[in-house]
Image (cartoon, rainbow, N blue to C red):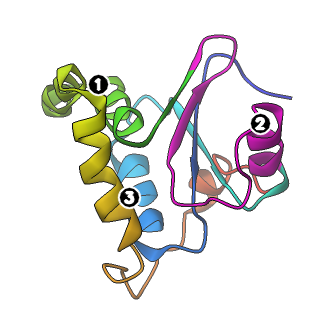
Amino acid sequence: MTDSSKYYVFYDGDCGMCNYWVQWILKNDHRKQFLFSALQSEFGQKFLNERNLDNQQLNTLYLWKPNAFYETKSHAVFKIAKILGGKYVLLGYLNALPRPVTDFFYDRVAANRKRFSVQQCALPTAEEQGRFIEK
């Protein structure tokens, strides 16, 4: 069951850098608009399979709004920034750049994400745990 009023962020759950950015979104999502699911989870795999996306390719960030859209890679990042609002909305305007250019840079970071990895992951609070879809 999905909540069509929420935005779903799908990320590589085994990536320290990815987990760091999920924690960053949690910290800055004052309106609690985002829910999170690792691509490796049952829910993440279902999302990928329903869209005929490669369920073994875990280096892509997805942002999904049920019954509306899903974005990938750099455009998912820009959309998240725009939704967060405030000073981050400026980052959202980068989606005006050609997608091949912005995804080129996204892909370089994604290919090296384990090298940039944060060694420690913060544990979510009890309230934050409710925003993760584990199944």
Say if the magenta span includes residue 4: no
- Amino acid residing under circle 3: Trp
Give percent across and percent down for residue 113: 38, 72
The residue labelled by disc 3 is 21
The residue sitting at the bottom extreme is 119
Residue at image x 74%, y 54%?
Answer: 55
Q: Closest to the observer: 129 or 68? A: 68
Badge 1 element: helix
Give percent across and percent down for residue 116: 30, 78
User: On screen, 16 above or below 53?
Assistant: below
Q: Quadrant of the N terminus?
A: top right
The residue labelled by disc 1 is 82
Residue at image x 68%, y 55%?
Answer: 39
User: On screen, 43 above or below 39?
Assistant: above
Q: CA distance from mark 3 to mark 2?
A: 26 Å
Characterize the local packing of mark 3: few (<14), some (14-19) or many (20 or more) Cα atoms within 10 angstroms. Answer: few
Residue extent of the magenta highlight: 43-69
Q: CA distance from mark 2 to mark 1?
A: 27 Å
| Mark 3–mark 2 CB contact (< 8 Å) | no
The residue labelled by disc 2 is 52
For marks 3 and 2, the one nearer the N-term is 3
